Every structure is written in C-alpha cells, then in structure tokens.
Amino acid sequence: MIVFDPAGHGPAKCQGMLSSLIVPRPIAMITTADEDGTVNVAPYSYFMPVTGEPPLLAVTIGGRRESEPSQKDTWRNASRTGELVVNVTTEAMRDKIEMAAMEFPAGVSELDAIGWHTTPSVKVTPPSLAESPAHLECRIHEVLDLGTTGVAYSTVHLVVCEVVCITMDESICSPELRVDPHALAPVGRMPFPYFVQAKGDSIFELERISFAEYQTLGAHPSEAS
C-alpha cells in the first residue's frame, strides 16, 4: 500500500494529488470583465453544482498568481463586480484550454491570443463565450476564504454563485429543455496533463429504480430490462 501523508508535502504536491484522484472534473471556462471592459477568460476545474433552489454552483478560484504575489484576474474582476459567466467547455474549445490557463499580464485579454469571441449575456455584465454552446450567468452568493494567505496553491476563495440565467444553443438542448450529452460533448480534467472527452462510447446509461422496485424485483434490478 502506498500512503500519501499531506503533512510531508507542500501545497503544490498536495493539490496535484487531489487533482489526480478527483477525476474527471468538468471545466468551467469563466469570463469576467475588468474596469475597462477587458474580458478575462480562464478555466477552473474545481467546480460543482450545489443545489436547485436557489440554483447555486461553487467554484474554487485561486486568490494569488503562481508566478508572482498578485491577485488572479478572475478573482479581482469577480469580487469587484459580483458577476461572472461559467461557459461549458466542449470539444470545439479543447485545443485552447491550456492557452486560456496561462497567466497573461493584467489587463491583457486571453481572447486576443486564443481567437475566441464573445456574445452579450442576458442578465450579467460579463459577456459569454460564443464558442461555448452553454452559458451559466452568475452572481456571487457567498465567498469562503480558505488556505494560507499569500501562498501559491493555497490561497483560494470558495465562491458560491447563484445562476440567474442559462443560455444554450438549440443544437444541445430540446424545446422541452432536455440537454443532449452527446451533442454537448463536454471536456473534463484528468491528472495533468491529461483531459477526457465525454463522447461516443464513453457515455453510457444506467437505469435508476426506487427501493420499492428493488424489493419487487427480488434484489435483481437487472431483471427490469
């Protein structure tokens, strides 16, 4: 048995181990805007849905750049405006994910280097990414500051956001509001430097039954088919 004791390792190694085992993780490609309207784009895979009423999601946003002791653009912009957009990262965006993750200088938009485009959001100021087929427009609901202040791979803000509007392309969602996972083709994070594509045979179905149905089937749910 291999034992990993966090007490014997630094923040980067501990985070790397968590990132290697808590997989696959969906990637929130977050757009925010600074005081001058410059759009910042960055991928975040420490990201999850929380509840449906109110509709909340949570994302861990680093508070400090890795290369220098200054705030990350996403956190600075989001904390100032209280708004951000989570753009679902899909197959069409996969080749530019790591470029979006680069620490560009403050005030420089990743869009210029990546070649992505924006489209106006419905209820929040930051624009959405045109390359993504699904956008969750958010307002910050609550922030929990965690980690050790000023330490890279440790200083983080757990940001709980209320989703105030969702816009989707008709190619991935039916008029009955059912999202087609095959058409969505989302990309997820695996241990660095790997990713995973939810597409084709990697998507499969499992039946869900109630406990009452389970008892009726004599503890053999497979007989239901």
Image: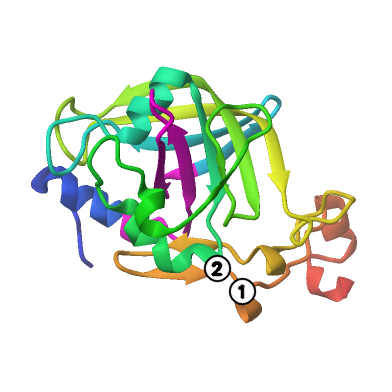
Q: Nearer the viewer, residue 125 or 90?
A: 125
Q: Answer left or right for 3 relative to 82.
A: left
Q: Is residue 38 magenta?
A: yes
Q: Which region shows up in magenta?
A: 19-47
Say few, some or many: other residues with alpha carbon within 10 Å of mark 2 (under 14 / 14 to 19 / 20 or more).
Answer: some
User: What whole-number distance in Å separates the C-alpha atoms at marks 1 and 2?
Assistant: 9 Å
Colour scheme of the rendered structure: rainbow
Residue 199 appearing in the image: yes
Task: Mark 1 vs mark 2: give the one in front.
Answer: 2
| Image quadrant where one finds the N terminus | bottom left
Q: Quadrant of residue 184?
A: bottom right
Above-or-below relation of 186 to 8: below
Residue 198, x across and y down, in percent: 58, 69
Residue 56, x across and y down, in percent: 60, 30
Q: Is residue 148 magenta?
A: no
Q: Amino acid at mark 1?
A: Lys
Do labels 1 and 2 touch, CB within 8 Å?
A: yes
Say few, some or many: other residues with alpha carbon within 10 Å of mark 1 (under 14 / 14 to 19 / 20 or more).
Answer: some
Q: How many marks?
A: 2
Residue 21 appearing in the image: no
Above-or-below relation of 206 to 8: below
Residue 199 bears which disc, if any? 1
Residue beneath label 2, please?
91
Task: Name the element at disc 1.
Answer: loop
Residue 158, x across and y down, in percent: 40, 30
Residue shown at 46%/66% (left/top)?
94
Task: Name the element at disc 2.
Answer: helix
Above-or-below relation of 209 to 69: below
